[in-house]
Image (cartoon, rainbow, N blue to C red):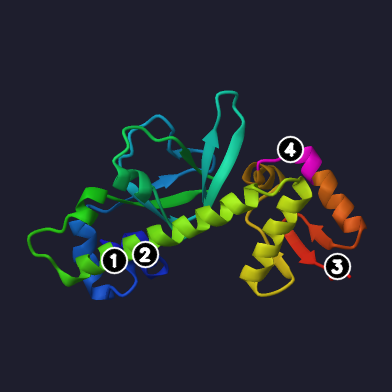
């Protein structure tokens, strides 16, 4: 069965679990795979969370929309990354956010109740799975704290510099790519796209950075 799910070793959820154990583990948590075309909803706000997902191929984003239709991107997921676990663990009745495929996606769906409650065999690999899940949730909490600090910046320029600086540190150099186009970046930073684009051009003219589409190079500010 696992041959239909791609390279599961890319996911932190399965860290430390031997490949020979995956077949039994996937059956234990009622795993199944589903394809979603780009732009289609994987989760929709207002629905009851039905599963926990892992991106096997493609990309997905978590989106929050207010009453007036203003869109805020909360997170971006690439192959191997997990989503939906917080809502499933909290047993919320309805989802406050949506998850959309931004490229054609293959999603591995897991029954979260089966993840948290091992079967009567109490296999060692299932205990490892629960440990990995808790570690992922803790790491995501740190990322949310980082996002809160980013959004606390007062101006569009400060938000851009904070975000791009973080991406440079993560990539280990001044030159890097970001996972967003201009509209998605504006949604992620909760700023107006036109104002953000104008600010990027000013920063480029001041010699702070260079960019082409989603590729950036940060310059020495001196």
Give the magenta part as a residue range: 190-196
Instruction: Please tell me the numbered disc located at residue 187.
Output: none
Q: Is residue 56 left or right of residue 174?
A: left
Q: Indicate the secondary structure of the residue bearing disc 4.
A: loop
Question: Are the residues tagged 3 and 4 within 8 Å (C-beta)?
Answer: no
Task: Name the residue tied to disc 2.
Answer: 135
Alpha-carbon span between mark 1 and mark 2: 6 Å
Q: Which residue is mark 4?
A: 192
CA distance separating discs 4 and 1: 40 Å
Kindly identify the residue that appears in the image at 32 percent across and 65 percent down: 132
Q: Is residue 90 left or right of residue 169?
A: left
Taking the image as drawn, is residue 77 in sight?
no
Neighbor class of circle 4 (other Cα within 10 Å; few <14, some 14-19, many 20+) is few
- Residue 177 falls in image quadrant: bottom right
Q: Earlier in the sequence, mark 3 or mark 4?
A: 4
Crowding near the residue tagged with mark 2, few <14, some 14–19, many ≥20 C-alpha atoms within 10 Å: some
What element does badge 3 sit on? loop
Image location (x, y in percent) of residue 24: 18, 65
The crowd level at tag 1 (other Cα within 10 Å; few <14, some 14-19, many 20+) is some
The image position of residue 100, as x and y in percent, is 50, 42
The residue identified by callout 1 is: 131
């Amino acid at each position: 069965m696992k041959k239909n799910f791609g390279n599961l070793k890319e996911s932190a959820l399965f860290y430390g679990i031997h490949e020979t154990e995956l077949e039994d583990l996937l059956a234990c948590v009622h795993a199944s795979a589903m394809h979603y075309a780009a732009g289609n909803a994987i989760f929709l706000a207002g629905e009851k969370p039905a599963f926990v997902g892992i991106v096997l191929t493609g990309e997905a984003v978590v989106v929050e929309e207010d009453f007036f239709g203003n869109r805020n991107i909360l997170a971006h997921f690439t192959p191997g990354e997990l989503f939906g676990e917080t809502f499933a663990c909290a047993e919320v009745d309805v989802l406050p956010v949506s998850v959309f495929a931004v490229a054609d996606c293959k999603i591995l769906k897991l029954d979260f109740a089966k993840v948290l409650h091992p079967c009567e065999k109490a296999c060692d690999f299932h205990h490892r799975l629960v440990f990995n899940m808790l570690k992922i949730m803790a790491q995501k909490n740190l990322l949310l704290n980082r996002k809160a600090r980013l959004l606390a910046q007062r101006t569009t320029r400060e938000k851009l510099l904070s975000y791009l600086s973080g991406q440079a540190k993560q990539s280990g150099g001044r030159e890097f790519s970001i996972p967003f186009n201009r509209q998605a970046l504006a949604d992620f930073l909760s700023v107006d796209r036109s104002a953000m684009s104008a600010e990027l051009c000013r920063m480029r003219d001041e010699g702070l950075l260079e960019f082409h589409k989603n590729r950036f190079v940060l310059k020495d500010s001196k």
